[in-house]
Amino acid sequence: MTDDHSIPQNWAGYDETEHATWRALFARQHALLPGRAAPAFLEGLERLPIFGDGIPDFDTLNDVLGRATGWQIVAVPGLVPDAVFFRHLAARRFPATRSIRKPEAMDYLEAPDVFHDVFGHAPMLMLPVFADYMEAYGKGGLKALGLGALERLARVYWYTVEFGLVRLPEGLRIYGSGIVSSRAESLFCLDDASPNRIAFDLSRVLRTRYRIDDFQECYFAIDGFDALLELARIDFAPIYREVASLPDIGPGELIASDHVITRGTGAYHKAKL
């Protein structure tokens, strides 16, 4: 393993069970996402060579991705240290876990796998404005480490890149990788009455805790993808200072200043108490 934690993908080392798991996951999401995922995601998916018989070869994938936006997928053994992750993003490299989930764990993962990382992230990296946002996030992450603000910046990543919604003329659509790679959350985030759906506000998101063990209680929706580029141009340092003295907001909490798109019932999470 190198200093940046990258490793060879070793595509030839995947066995038929692993390829079959990818095929099953891909077929399920590919059938589910039209009309739910943002058109930009679906277009990126169509343009990438990931419709084959199994787990994509990163070299082939990178030929297309590199020509489109200059991004590359690099294989890593699992989660990498924050500074390493940010350096990869700042250099237009997305670190993707090499391994894939077991067939008996199709619907729940404690940590990302190659399906989440490639199916979930790569299509949006075909969109120039999103590609620029991800690079800016990597650079901002390195700054946040020096400012002691990493926890707050992580919330922005969580509520955009991982679990973000976008408001389009045709309605709310999914673009976050944690949603598009999950059948259950693809349904829950748009169809269920339980979660709140709120217009994205940076200061609000910097204060908002999130769920890592279940569906989100609140989803934040940006107004089109140009909003991400505007976000990438902001100096976060003054906003970090501004929110430092304010209390955190719970994962399912609404506040007076929220622009609520859909007020949720909270029924799903209340039933688990």
Image (cartoon, helix red, strand yellow):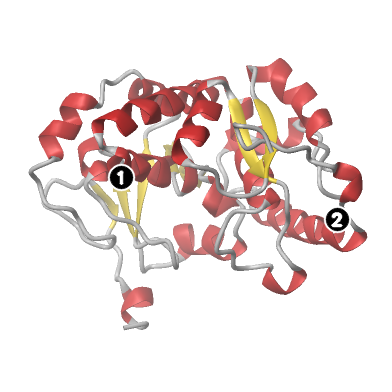
Identify residue for label 1.
151
Q: Is residue 53 visible?
A: no
Mark earlier in primary sequence (2, 1): 2
Q: Is residue 68 left or right of residue 53?
A: left
Identify residue for label 2.
19
**At 68% from the left edge and 26% from the top edge, which residue is drawn?**
72
The quadrant of the picture occupied by the N terminus is top right
In this view, the residue in front, 24 or 142, is 142
User: Residue 267: which quarter of the image?
Assistant: bottom left
**At 72% from the left edge and 74% from the top edge, which residue is drawn?**
104
Q: Are marks 2 and 1 in contact (CB under 8 Å)?
A: no
Mark 2: which amino acid? Answer: His
Farthest residue toward the left?
245
Q: Is residue 61 visible?
A: yes
Q: Nearer the viewer, mark 2 or mark 1?
A: 1
In this view, the residue in front, 209 or 111, is 111
**At 45% from the left edge and 49% from the top edge, which residue is drawn?**
163
**At 87% from the left edge and 63% from the top edge, which residue is drawn?**
17
- Where is residue 136 drawn, in percent x and y? 43, 22
Q: Is residue 230 left or right of residue 253?
A: right
Q: Secondary structure at mark 1?
A: helix
- Where is residue 140 drawn, in percent x and y? 37, 26
Which disc is residue 195 wearing? Answer: none
Report, in whole angstroms, how far the alpha carbon at label 2 lies from the one at label 1: 36 Å
Q: Secondary structure at mark 2?
A: helix
Check the image and report above or below for 185 versus 59: below
Mark 1: which amino acid? Answer: Glu
- Where is residue 39 drawn, in percent x and y? 59, 36
Check the image and report above or below for 239 versus 15: above
